[in-house]
Amino acid sequence: MPKEAISRLDDNTIREKVLPYCRLKPGEIWEDPLKKHRIGVLDATSRKDCKKINNCKNVDLFIQDPPYNIAVGNKNTNQLSRINIENYLEFSKNWIENSLDMMSDNSHFYIWLGADQKRGFQPLPEFMILMRQYEELKSRSFISLRNQRGYGTQKNWMAVRQELLYYTKGDPAFKVTYTDIPKVLKGYYKTINGVKTDNLERGKSDTIRPGNIWLDIQQVFYRMEENIPGAYAQKPLKSIERIIKTSSKEGDIVADFFAHSGTTLMASERLNRRCITFDMDPVFAELTIRRLERYRETGKTGWQWENPFPEISSNDPLLS
């Protein structure tokens, strides 16, 4: 089986090798000349930085993927680290309030989050309680995405889920979409105009609508074109596209304060939305720009096994 050409980009050793090839420095913004996407190296907790990339209340959809306060592989890095819960909540409060400053009157707000089953399921319950203080946001759904792989032991259930919290501000439009899962279950009979029908007859599609448990989205990235080697917090493109299709329309502005592998930007590009996104780390801002450029040049959504930073030799032992 082929091996990814580069290991974790949030590892400081690899990051230092990649930094010289990043076109943005902290505080800088790149604007796409074609569709006016904006990508920056900015701090989500800084009100000044957030206003710098968008000084208006015109964001129609937020898709936020902050750090989960979970050390991936028991390894703390600048991107994926574990801090005490009080500091994590203060960090969260700052970026939430900066998001609210940019939201339009009728808008959607999604947050990916995790629950560490070894630490009392932090930070999920604490975060959900924190969100209650923002009265302008209405809780709408608690979605779970099934991972194809997980972690666990022979003495516990394997953890194979990520959580997606959904809130709205005002009364934004929501467009019904459908999965690729065919309808097979009959039942739920209802009499309409004197005729008894089942749900298959009444439905508008041969496939089912997505519920709040997403089992149909593939996430074995290393087998997929969209894979971004070295990006350990990558989300499936299909999941972000599902959010964008249901919760925005063409021409709307979509924002993501935690760009990482650039999936929100990629989905926005493919669905004709304008994206505003940034990351604290120049490496992931550069990765986001490169992913957009690669898609426009080749039609490919990622690199699968290949190195997104070919300037760095894949034979370097420090990269594996």
Image: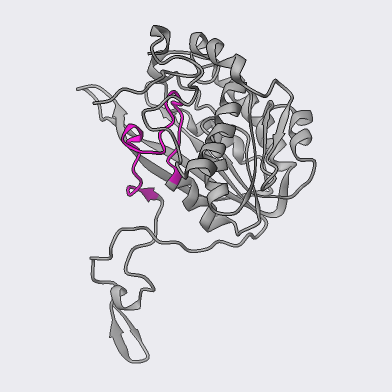
Q: Nearer the viewer, residue 117 or 173?
A: 173
User: In this view of the protein, can residue 281 be seen by the observer?
Assistant: no
**Residues rendered magenta in the picture:** 213-237
The x, y position of residue 285, in whole percent, is 60, 28
Residue for point 36% across, 34% down: 221
Up-down: is 209 above or below 225? below
Residue 178 is a magenta residue: no
Residue at the far bottom in the pictured view: 194
Residue 247 position, x and y percent, is 56, 56
| Residue at x-position 28% and y-position 85% | 196
The image quadrant where one finds the C terminus is top left
- Residue 236 vs residue 159: left or right? right
In the rendered image, residue 56, in percent from the top left (x then y), is placed at: 79, 45
Count of labels shown? 0
Q: What secondary structure predominates along the stretch shown in magenta?
A: loop
Specify the quadrant of the image occupied by residue 207: bottom left
Task: Using the image as rendered, state which of residue 244 and residue 192 is in the foreground.
Answer: 244
Residue ID at (48%, 21%) = 310
Whether residue 57 sits left or right of residue 239 in the image: it is right
Residue 203 visible at all: yes
Height in image: 305 above or below 215? above
Q: Residue at x 38, y 7 (%)?
A: 317
Please identify the quadrant where the N terminus is shown: top left
Q: Residue 65: horizontal and vertical position, in percent?
A: 54, 35
Give 238 or 316, whichever is nearer the viewer.
316
187 relative position to 37: left or right:
left
Snapshot colouring:
one colour
- Between residue 88 and residue 235, name the one nearer to us: 235
